[in-house]
């Protein structure tokens, strides 16, 4: 389930980035900007592309929920000993949705900065590194879910989708820690949406070479 979280957050985040690149190259967004703000377009893009992923995950959660309620009756089945606790099913859904929205805002901003899939693959590392670090830290957190490392790492919003889920499945932490992690992710996503929409607003109208860091700072000031 951890690998499902990891793979799907990255896959659908990259799908958002590719969608932005396609619309940027077709010049559709130049027309749309006349009737909606950059933040509205960005949020709509994330929700629209994510609908496919959310539908797929909903089906998985329904199947997992069936396992948790009725189990697998066949003793000869390879899944006979599979048991997914209800809290694990709920946590998977919650952290997938929150993780998807948080990482997709970054992918959308990166997509607005480039002009092709090849360039996108070269600049996607800022969005990939945090979740890769979270996967690397998953093993020590699984072994010691109540350690200081596990506590602080699972509350870091970019690590939360993976590490808090690992803690919940290994040894469920106090509810206040789970709620705090959700609040921190929501606040981070809202902040990223504002920041990314500024880059998005300028980036989708820019063509040619990728922007440098000084140019990005100018974009943020201009869009502000």
Image (tube, helix red, strand yellow):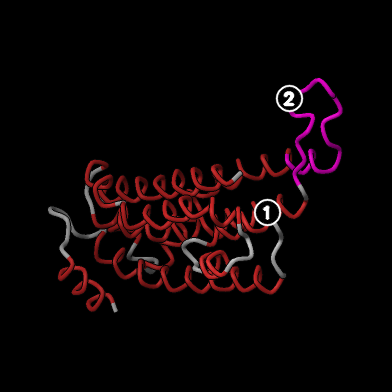
Q: Going by the image, does 223 lie left or right of 51?
A: left
Q: Residue at the spot x=64%, y=52% of the render?
A: 92
Mark 2, Cα crowd under 10 Å, few <14 / some 14-19 / many 20+, is few
Distance between mark 1 and mark 2 Cα atoms: 22 Å
Q: Residue at the spot x=50%, y=67% of the render?
A: 157
- List the single residue furthest toward the top: 76
Indicate whether 72 appears above or below 219: above
Residue receiving disc 2: 78
Residue receiving disc 1: 170
Q: Going by the image, does 53 lie left or right of 25?
A: right
Q: Earlier in the sequence, mark 1 or mark 2?
A: 2
Q: Total label count?
A: 2
Helix, strand or loop at label 1? It is helix
Q: Nearer the viewer, residue 25 or 138?
A: 138
- The stretch of residues the image draws in magenta is 64-84
Mark 1, Cα crowd under 10 Å, few <14 / some 14-19 / many 20+, is some
Indicate whether 52 appears above or below 170: above
Q: Going by the image, does 174 lie left or right of 207?
A: right
What is the number of the mark on residue 11?
A: none
- List the single residue furthest toward the left: 209
């Amino acid at each position: 389930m951890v690998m499902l979280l990891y793979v799907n957050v990255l896959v659908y985040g990259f799908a958002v980035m590719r969608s932005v690149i396609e619309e940027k190259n077709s010049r559709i967004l130049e027309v749309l900007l006349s009737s909606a703000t950059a933040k509205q377009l960005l949020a709509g893009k994330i929700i629209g592309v994510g609908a496919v992923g959310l539908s797929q995950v909903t089906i998985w959660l329904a199947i997992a929920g069936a396992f948790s309620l009725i189990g697998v009756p066949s003793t000869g089945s390879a899944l006979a000993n599979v048991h997914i606790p209800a809290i694990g099913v709920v946590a998977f859904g919650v952290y997938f949705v929150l993780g998807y929205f948080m990482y997709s805002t970054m992918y959308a901003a990166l997509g607005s900065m480039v002009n092709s899939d090849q360039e996108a693959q070269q600049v996607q590392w800022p969005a990939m590194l945090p979740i890769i670090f979270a996967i690397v830290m998953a093993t020590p957190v699984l072994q010691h879910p109540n350690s200081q490392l596990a506590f602080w790492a699972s509350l870091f919003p970019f690590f939360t989708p993976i590490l808090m889920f690992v803690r919940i499945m290994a040894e469920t932490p106090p509810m206040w820690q789970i709620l705090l992690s959700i609040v921190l992710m929501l606040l981070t996503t809202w902040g990223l949406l504002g920041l990314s929409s500024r880059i998005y607003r300028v980036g989708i109208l820019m063509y040619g070479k990728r922007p440098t860091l000084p140019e990005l700072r100018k974009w943020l000031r201009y869009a502000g």
